[in-house]
Structure formats: C-alpha cells, structure tokens
Image (cartoon, coloured by chain):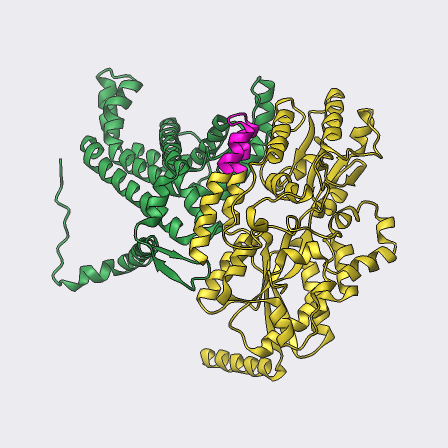
Chain colours: A yellow, B green
Amino acid sequence: MKLRNTLTSMALALTALSAQAQTEIQMWHSMSGALGEWVNGLANSYNQSQKDYKVVPVFKGNYDESMTAAMAAFRGGNAPHVLQVFEVGTATMMYSKGAIVPVAKVMKDAGYKFDPSVYIPAVAGYYTAPNGDIQSLPFNSSTPVFWYNKDAFKAAGLDPESPPKTWTELTLAASKLKASGHKCPFTTAWQTWVHLETFSAWHDVEFATQRNGFKGLNARLNVTTPLHVRHIENLANMSANGLFVYKGRAGAAGATFESGECAMYTNSSAAYAGIKRNAKFAFGVSTLPYYPDVKGAPQNTIIGGASLWVMAGKNSNEYKGVAGFFDHLSKTDVQAKSHQDTGYLPITTAAYQATEKSGFYKQNPGTDVSVTQMVRKTTDRSQGIRLGNFVQIRTIMDEELEQVWSGKKSPKDGLEAIKKRGDELLVRFENANR
Amino acid sequence: MTFEKRVRFRSSWLPWALVAPQLLVVVLFFFWPAGQALLESVYESDAFGMSSTFVGLDNFKRLFADETYLQSFWTTAIFSIWVAGCGLTIALLLAVMADRIVPYAIAPAVVGVLWVFMFTPSMGVVSHALKQAGVDWNHLLNSTHAMTLIVTAAVWKQISYNFLFFLAALQSVPKSLLEAAAIDGAGPWMRFWTIQLPLITPTAFFLLVVNIVYAFFDTFAIIDATTSGGPGKDTAILVYKVYQDGFKAMDLGGSAAQSVVLMAIVIALTVLQFRYIEKRVNY
C-alpha cells in the first residue's frame, strides 16, 4: 500500500514537471563560495528574462574533477550541455571534435548575429580557432599582475606609490626590503603561468613554436632561449640571495602575501578579492615587471581562468537555449556587472568601456591594471597558449623549476629538461590527434 | 601444534552459496576493475573515449623509457620501507606498553592537510619548533624534509590500526606461559623476545603485508595534500603518478599501464613475503 502511494505521488510529480514544458540546460561548473553565487545569479537572470529555457548550474568540484566527470558522463551519454573548462584544458577540448560544438556554430545555428570583433582579442583569442571561429565562450578570465605591500615599502624606505616596473627595479626593491629585515621580499604564485607562459607573451616571444600551438599540433616548447634562461637565472640568483622565496605550486603563495610575510608577489588579478578581505596593510597593484631592453616588451599578458564549452549530442532546441544564455552573458550590462563584481576580466570591449565610463576604475584604483595589460592588439606570439597534455606539462615545469630553486639543477639544465620532457608529451598528443 | 578445524558440508552448493556474497564483492570490486586496467593499458584512447587504438606494449615501453618513472621506484621503495618499518615498530612498542589509543578512522586527505598545517615552512607549529632547534624546515624545496613529512603523516595514520591488532594479539598470549617464565626468572625483555613475539608472528606477518599494500596504494591522498609529489619528483611514489596521470591529466592508457606495473610489484612482493617470511611464522 505504501509503495503504491509513493508511486502515485511520483507519477504526479512527473506530470507536473512535464506540464511546465521548459527545456533544461545543464551547466557544470567549478565555482564555489561567492563565485558560485555569481554563477547562480547569472543563470537566474537569464531564466527570468525568458520562459522557454531554464539553465541549471551544477557545481562539480574543482576544474580537474568537473572535467573528469564530464568525460565520464559523455562516455555514458549523459554529458551536460555546457561545461566550464580551465584554460589548460583548451587544446584537449578543441581537438575532441566529436565531443564539442564550437560556440560560433551554436550561435549561428540558433540565428544569433555573432560578431567575434566585439570580444577583447587577448581574451577571446585564447579560445579562437585559426578560421576565426570562437570555440568556447570566455567566462572567468584573469591575468598575472604584480602585487606589493605598501606598508613594507614605506618601512624599507621605498616609495609606495612607484612600484618597480622592470626586473632590475624589482631586484633592487627586494634588496632594500631584505635590508630592512624582510624575510620574504618577493614570491610568486602559479610560477609556470607567470614566469614562463605569460613571461613569453609579455616579451613578445614564443612560448612554444607554431604560434604557441595555435597553428598546429606540431608545436614544441620554446623555453630554452637566452631570454628564458636569463629570467630563470635571475630568479635563481634572487632565490640564492634570499630575495625570492619559493612558496609552493599553484596558488600556495597567496596566503604568504596576504599575511604580510612576503612583501611583493606576482599572481592572478583575480587575487584582488582575497587580498582585499585578508590583508591588514595597504597594498598596491601594478603591471608585471619586464626587461626593457627586449624589443617589443611589454606586449600583452595572457589569460588564465576558464571558458564555457558546449557539448555535442544535444537537440537543436536545447542548443537554442544555450545560445540564448551565451548571448545574455555577452550583453554589455551583464558583462560589466560581472567584471565589477568578481574582478574577472570583461570579455567584450563594450563592457570595459561601460565600466570605465561609470567611474569604477577611479573609485577602485588598481582594478584596471589587468585590463590595460590585455586591451592591446595581440601579436602572433602573444595570443595565448594551446598545447595538448598541458596539465602534465605544467606539472613538469613545476618539478623542474623546483630543482632550479633548490639549486639541484642550473637554470639552463632545468629549462632543457622542461623542453625534453614536455616535447615528448606534445609528440604523443600530436600522434593521438592526427 | 595444528588442530583439524574443517567443517564438512553435506551438499555441494551450500558452501558456494555462503561465500557467494563475498565472491561477488571481490569479482565486482577487484577482478573486474583489474581486468579493465589490463585492457586499458594496451590501448591509447582520447579523453572523451571516442576513439581507442590498440597500441600493444607502447604504454609500457614509454613508461620504462622515462627516467623519472624509474626514479619513482626508488622513491616508493624508500617510502614503503619507512612507512611499514616505523608503522609496525612504533605500534608494537605502543601495544606492548598498552598506551592510549590513537584515532584510526581518518581520511588520508585529512591526515595530509593536518600535517601540512603543522609543517608549513613559515607558520607551522612543528616547523616553528624546528626552527627554534636550529633546523631550517622547508619541505617545499628540501627533499629529505618532504620525505620525512609524508612518512610521518602516513605512519601516524596507520599506527592505530597496527596497534589494535598488536594489542589483541598480545592479549591472546596465554598468561600462564608468561607467569611460568617469570617464575623461571625471565625478565620482561626476555619474556617479550622468547614468548610474546614468537606467538604474535601471525599478526605481525599479516600487518606487514597490509602495511606494504597501504604504503603502495593508499597513500596518494596524503601526498596530494602535502607535497604534490615535490620538490621536483622526489616524493612522487608510483601510485601518486597513477592518480595524477589518470585523474588529473586524463591519460587513461598510461595510467592503466602504471597500475598494471604496480599490481605486478605488489603481487610479487606478497608472494615473496608468503614464501620466505611466512616460514618464520608460528601458527
């Protein structure tokens, strides 16, 4: 009897659901906490703007976890419609042709006028195919910037309003900070993203051949040039002299800056929210240091973060809903609000201009640093990085750089090992996707 | 002394039916995945499983051509010996002293996070104390420090498990034997060495096998939460790379090949243990 009751009520519930006739769009993402609320807010505002589609955001763990989950779901035929993928997974997604539908195609098929030129080149370019079609929609993008502790600068006799612009100036500032008793003058988060990947674009040199992999699968690492060796040597010397202190892989160094232990550091522009909340000192943000004698430097920095991919195998009605959602996300007011609320980069030039006009950058000094590093015309060498097996290559770079900082390997040997081990993975990816 | 303890069943299907649930679990959760791993290890497939190419032994050839992979055998050996050695000795010591019980049911990742907090170079309690004692603790760049950290965390998690088994075994040693020995004038050390230890060898042997398997397979979460295999690759034991390549880098073929290698090693080790060490066990 009880069972029958349950079944009846379940049947009733199902009828009620189908009566709404709303098409659900599943979106898997990796944004937790305040950023999770931001994603839910975006979905809500789209859901309220129309009646036919309902975007359902589902938090699926961190970036690797949600990507693994989506791959398993795809194998089982239950992939979500939209998947948020971090930038290092770009090549894997792009070359999985049968698993994804390019965003440009989704938009065109759904009848939206899709003009790639409204997107900021350095942001959208990362996710654009050689034929100019945007493959995935840039969602949350940030870029490396330079953060410093103004109180520590004052204590060391440095001008807190003129942060170091070049590596020479930075080394000098670090020495002064050390002389004033600072234990950790300079550190960095995301060492490979900042000091190899972005470093290359910032100095307008290739990080990998074939335009950093944009032109084809036969790209190989290009990190053994004199400029790369010079920079890693510079950091290794700073490390040996106690001017640069290594604080771990990924974002581990963040806590050491926020606590005041380290006085200067390079990290994502998205670190803003955390620093603002936790730092008990005046902090400043500035552009990434560079070597002024390098021709073309500073060029532009490159992005990190994630983009939204559309998975294959859904019906055209569902894709219409996805296209509508993406169109909603690209609207100037929605974009400008996202940019101002989260600190992530705007994806359209119009959103940047609207934010500028509103006086937001003047009220929140420093928030425009990341944007000005990006709103430039990119070159063939600075558009972004598109390499297969990039997750493993990043690990290799971390491993070898650690050998350099600990003095076990010379900078040149470390970079050569990165090239050798990384190229093996690139060859494998080329063979697997030919 | 051996006792005949066999139970005889009249029907032939009943014993099978009785062990069927257990067999089902073993087949479902061990043989089937192991078979899958064997199969995957000779294929190269893309991330979404749309194409799968038979590549024979290529995955294995590539592994053994990789110097860093060969290095991680050495890392694993050192790690396992330390974990099993310290884990067993300390637990036995504690059991003998019947000291207080250390918590046992803790997720490895929690253990990792706990220890990494205590050892964080700049703020950790332990690293601060070490600094006071003149040791400049830095497991981010010093591989000996990193190895010490993961061994400590792994041993700490396993000690209580070992302890419970040792304590139970020690308590089942007949009191009369110990009393007789005491009357004959044997001191505590003598009694332990000649009576208790020989009588608990079955438990010790069981724990040795379990601890080796633990060190080989069950410690990747600890490593992931503390050192991520660094500095360099100095704490990347075999199972950590399996996890990283399979679940973070989506290289299923390569990861499967590594788990086949790992499986072979542990089978070989267990066989060796049963052949040579078990001979010294008194049941």
Query: Which of the 4 image quarters holds residue B176?
Result: top left
Residue A206, position as x, y percentages in the image: 61, 44
Corner quadrant of residue A231: top right
Above or below, A216 relative to A104: above
Dominant secondary structure, magenta: helix
Q: Quadrant of the C terminus of chain A?
A: bottom left
With A122 as the anchor, is B252 left or right in this view? left
Location of the N terminus of chain A (image quadrant): bottom left
Q: Is residue B123 left or right of residue A284?
A: left
**In the image, is A21 to the left or to the right of A372?**
left
Residue nearer the viewer, B21 or A317:
A317
Which portion, as a residue range, is magenta?
A398-418
Residue at horizontal 56 percent and vertical 80 percent from the top: A13
Is A415 one of the magenta-colored residues? yes
The residue positioned 42% from the left and 54% from the top of the image is A431
Q: Is residue B111 visible?
A: no
Nearest the viewer among A159 and B88 is A159
Viewer-side residue, A101 vs B123:
A101
- The answer to which image quadrant residue B274 occupies is top left
- Measuring from the top left, give residue A375's x and y in whole percent: 76, 52
Q: For the image shown, how many numbered marks are present on the structure? A: 0
Q: Position of residue A183 (x, y in %)?
A: 69, 25
Asked if the stretch drawn in magenta spans residue A107, the answer is no
**Residue at screen point 36% across, 43% down:** B63
As drawn, the residue found furthest toward the front would be A295
> What percent of the width, then of the height, locates residue A78?
49, 69
Q: Does residue B31 sit above or below B238 in this rendering?
A: below
Frontmost residue, A408 versus A66: A408
| Above or below, B224 relative to A371 | above
Residue at position x 61%, y 40% in the image: A196
Residue A101 appears anywhere in the view: yes
